Amino acid sequence: MSTGSPEGRSGSVRGGPRLIHLNGPSGIGKSTVARLYADRHPGVLDLDTDRIVSLIGGWRADFFGTLPMARRLAVTMTETHLRSGFSVVMPQLATHLNEVSGFEEAARAAGVPYVEIALTAAKPHAFDRYSSRSSDGPARDIDEIIGRAGGLELIDRVHDHLAAYLRQRPKCTVVDTETLDVEQTYAAVLEILGVP
């Protein structure tokens, strides 16, 4: 049984529909928090671009080449769902401005706020989380792709790129998750959003 307030055309959740972008490195808990939010707020779309990538033929052989196609699809899905009067929660690592510009434009076109929240942790803790996470389905395949692309060395570079990106995003709220469990991280996100 889901809890929390339903989202809909009436905007019954404080602030009304919005695009909630959960940014952060792989393994930090973005997808888990997004799933909790969608489960507890009926009508919210949990839009994970990695899942959309897995629907496109050849993605395992060329993940990074397929990702831009998946992102374009995700932008269209985002605007469609926002225009229907429901929020979208998007767990998606972004380290360059061009990776979020389409989503920001979709939110503007739908007349709703774009809220970016970055879940972070110090590198050693982030590495531990990534190394110890369990994954299945497309997530397992993506972990294998990350492993082939450098594994923790790639995660290390991504961490640095994310830090540089966040310096360009003064409106992004950063949540240090190092001492937080999943429910505490989720509660921190709810507090930022101002929703029950």
Image (cartoon, rainbow, N blue to C red):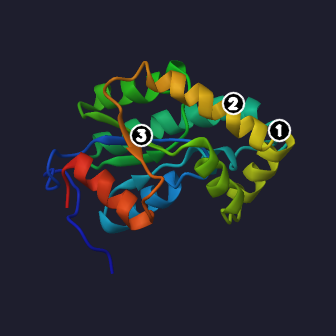
Q: Earlier in the sequence, mark 1 or mark 2?
A: 1
Residue matched to label 3: 78
Between the C-alphas of marks 1 and 2, the distance is 10 Å
Q: Which mark is residue 157?
A: 2
Q: Quadrant of the N terminus?
A: bottom left
Name which residue type carries label 1. Gly
Residue matched to label 1: 150
Q: Nearer the viewer, mark 2 or mark 3?
A: 2
Instruction: Give 115 or 122, whichever is nearer the viewer.
Output: 122
Q: Is residue 15 left or right of residue 32?
A: left
At numbered mark 1, what does the secondary structure look like: helix, strand or loop? Answer: loop
Residues under numbered marks 1 and 2 in contact, where contact means CB atoms less than 8 Å apart: yes
Q: Residue at x 13, y 52 (%)?
A: 10
Callout 3 crowding tier (Cα within 10 Å): few <14, some 14–19, many ≥20: many
User: Would residue 37 be seen by someone viewing this image from the given angle?
Assistant: no
Q: Residue at x 42, y 40 (%)?
A: 78
Q: Quadrant of residue 133?
A: bottom right
Q: Earlier in the sequence, mark 2 or mark 3?
A: 3
Between the C-alphas of marks 2 and 3, the distance is 29 Å
Callout 2 crowding tier (Cα within 10 Å): few <14, some 14–19, many ≥20: few
Q: Position of residue 67 (x, y in %)?
A: 67, 34
Rendered view: 172 above or below 195: above
Between the C-alphas of marks 1 and 3, the distance is 31 Å
Name which residue type carries label 3. Thr
Name which residue type carries label 2. Arg
Q: Residue furthest bottom?
A: 1
Q: Earlier in the sequence, mark 1 or mark 3?
A: 3
Instruction: Give 59 or 30, whichever is nearer the viewer.
Output: 30
Q: Residue at x 48, y 34 (%)?
A: 75
Callout 1 crowding tier (Cα within 10 Å): few <14, some 14–19, many ≥20: few
Q: Quadrant of residue 154?
A: top right
Q: Nearer the viewer, mark 1 or mark 3?
A: 1
